[in-house]
Amino acid sequence: MVVHLKWVAGPGVSESDIRHYDVVIAGGGITGLTLAAALRDTSLRIAIIDQNQPVAVSDEYSLRVSAINHAALRLFDEVGAFEGMVKLRVSPFREMHVWDSTGVGQIHFDSAELGLDTLGYIIENNVIQHALLAVIEQADTIDWLCPAKIASLELNHSLKRVDLDGGKSLTAHLVVGADGANSLVRQAMCIVLLRRPYKQQAIVCTVATEYDHQQTAWQCFLPTGPLALLPLQNGQCSVVWSLDQAEAETILALDNAAFAARLEQAFEYRLGSVKAVSSRAMFPLGHGHVDRYVQPGLALLGDAAHTIHPLAGQGANLGISDAACLAKVISEALQARRRWSALYTLRKYERSRKGANQLMEASMTTFKYLFGNDNPFLAELRNAGLNLVDHAAPVKQILIKRALGGI
């Protein structure tokens, strides 16, 4: 719960307990760490607050992965984090095959057609976090406060204040909410995320299949939602299966053998039989957007500002682009000796990102409703559309270049 406090040191909090920063980032996930890494070479003093330690990278693949596009990869390379990801493990995908289970419509993307080595990389979220943390740890101007939990925020002054559990307090000229869809910073800003649930759940797991994944991202559109098998470095696949609430609960409860059989059938045996299944998890799906990204000395990034359906794997990429844009706006203001935390500066970030994010949200919602039903007319329309685009090289290149981040 967020409580607005008066601008005084509370009981047991002395001035010596207050630490002063230029930027305080709430949230140590991919988006928050990307922003800190992108600002590491500035003169700004930065604190990152996160209550959860990143999940350790083990022999077993994490259930949460992201399909990282070229725009995000360029930023990771610029800040020196991609090399660390490669040393841990990354999984390139060179092709993408998408089809509609209700007909013969399909579309195929090949990196070779664009003169690229890959279309992107499937990377576990914890691998990205650890690589970004390794970069941040080399910066004397960045403090990683973890585990640390925000108890309250005071955002009504030019110098913002964040109080932590345990009595410590931080002040900053800019507080950034990169703390997810349930953002405390957003709540303190009195901004509402108009989240609209899809009444669906996504089941995630890792599977071993009979046939090689061929470094291809496979996605089948079913009437109940998309099913994706994403290639991993060890030859296995990461599964993201979107289902209506009741069906998702039923399938999650199946034993491994029954789950594997349902998955094989739903995926039309494109990769043969499923030989092994990891533990499984489920999370709700929805979409939403805030009407404002910024206030004086305040900014929202990533899922704190917008959420979308995972069917195209763009959620993480949008948050990374948010972080890159805000870092660029701040850096340019610093170089020009302008007030880098002022509203007129932060509005440049909002104007740059809000329209792009809204367009992606609308596109994914349209795809979800167009493909997520068994209406015969729509089925015929979308199958014809997939085949038409697949044979229209210029249109197909426009689509894939946009998905890759505008290469």
Image (cartoon, rainbow, N blue to C red):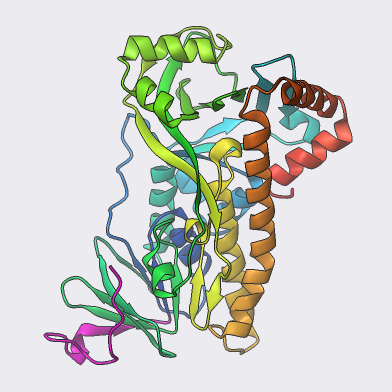
User: Which residue lies at the image location 33% right of the left edge and 14% below the top edge?
Assistant: 256
Residue 400 placement (x, y as % from top left): 74, 38
- The answer to whether residue 48 is above or below residue 90 is below
Residue 50 placement (x, y as % from top left): 31, 61
Residue 171 placement (x, y as % from top left): 34, 83
Answer with left or right where residue 84 lies relative to residue 154: right
The front one of 253 and 52 is 253
Residue 401 placement (x, y as % from top left): 75, 43
User: Which residue lies at the image location 44% right of the left edge and 84% below the top edge?
Assistant: 173
The front one of 359 and 346 is 359
- The answer to whether residue 249 is above or below residue 123 is above
Residue 94 can be seen in this image: no
Residue 175 can be seen in this image: yes
Dividing the picture into quarters, in which one does residue 353 lie? bottom right
Q: Is residue 12 magenta?
A: yes
Which residue in the rendered view is the most extreme toward the left?
Answer: 12
The front one of 274 and 22 is 274
Q: Is residue 315 magenta?
A: no
Q: Main secondary structure of the magenta part?
A: loop
Answer with left or right where residue 9 lies relative to residue 366: left
Q: Which residues are magenta?
A: 1-22
Quarter in which the N terminus is drawn: bottom left
- The answer to whether residue 148 is above or below residue 281 is below
User: Which residue lies at the image location 43% right of the left edge and 16% below the top edge?
Assistant: 208
Dividing the picture into quarters, in which one does residue 255 lie? top left
Count how many numbered circles sit on residues in the image: 0
User: Which residue lies at the image location 75% right of the left edge and 19% below the top edge?
Assistant: 105
